[in-house]
Image (cartoon, rainbow, N blue to C red):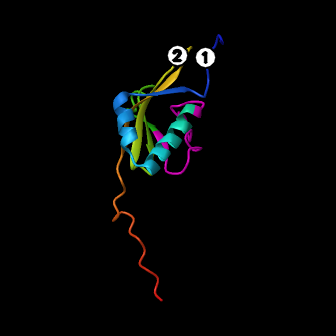
Amino acid sequence: MTDGFMGPPWQADWRIDALVTFEALPDHVREIVLAARAELVTAKDPYFRGVDADAGLPDGMRVVPGRSTDPKGRHICLFDNGHGWLKYSFVRRTEDPQIVVEEVFWQEADPLEFPTPPPAEE
């Protein structure tokens, strides 16, 4: 055991209601959520603080604080270009620091938002 603060990869846990929501998502969305979770648990700072701190995140994903007045509180990891999010907090303990996923949400994109191109003329 180390005497100092532990670093990534962080432990991660789900609230039961968040896990139930996650398990009800379509397979392709669960893969996106797991990729977002992987980014969080391997990040040096799971709150992605600083200028362009989340610039290394995959396209369509970003992290923002839940409240600007509480930068060490709950954060929101937006994924799938804002169609879904994970609300999480980071419990910064000397032993066993942990990310807790408190809520998962995803809504399928509106097909009118991204219209399909007309078929090519023959």
Residue pictured at 41% horizontal, 29% vertical: 74
Q: At label 2, which amino acid type do we have? A: Arg
Residue 25, by quadrant, is top left
The percent coordinates of residue 51 (x first, y second) are: 55, 39
Residue pictured at 48% horizontal, 89% vertical: 122
Classify residue 11 as left or right of residue 67. right
Q: Which mark is residue 93?
A: 2
Residue pictured at 56% horizontal, 26% vertical: 10
Q: At label 1, which amino acid type do we have? A: Phe
Q: Indicate whether residue 108 is drawn in magenta.
A: no
Where disc 1 sits, the SS reads: loop
Residue that extends furthest to the right in the rendered view of this protein: 2
Over which residues does the magenta segment extend? 42-63
Residue pictured at 60% horizontal, 28% vertical: 9
Question: Which sits earlier in the primary sequence, circle 1 or circle 2?
Answer: 1
Classed neighbour count for the residue bearing mark 1: other residues with Cα under 10 Å, few (<14), some (14–19), many (≥20): few
Q: Which residue is mark 1?
A: 5
Look at the image and tell me whether residue 37 can be seen: yes
Above/below status of 35 relative to 44: below
The percent coordinates of residue 79 (x first, y second) are: 45, 46
Above/below status of 105 relative to 10: below
The percent coordinates of residue 27 (x first, y second) are: 44, 48
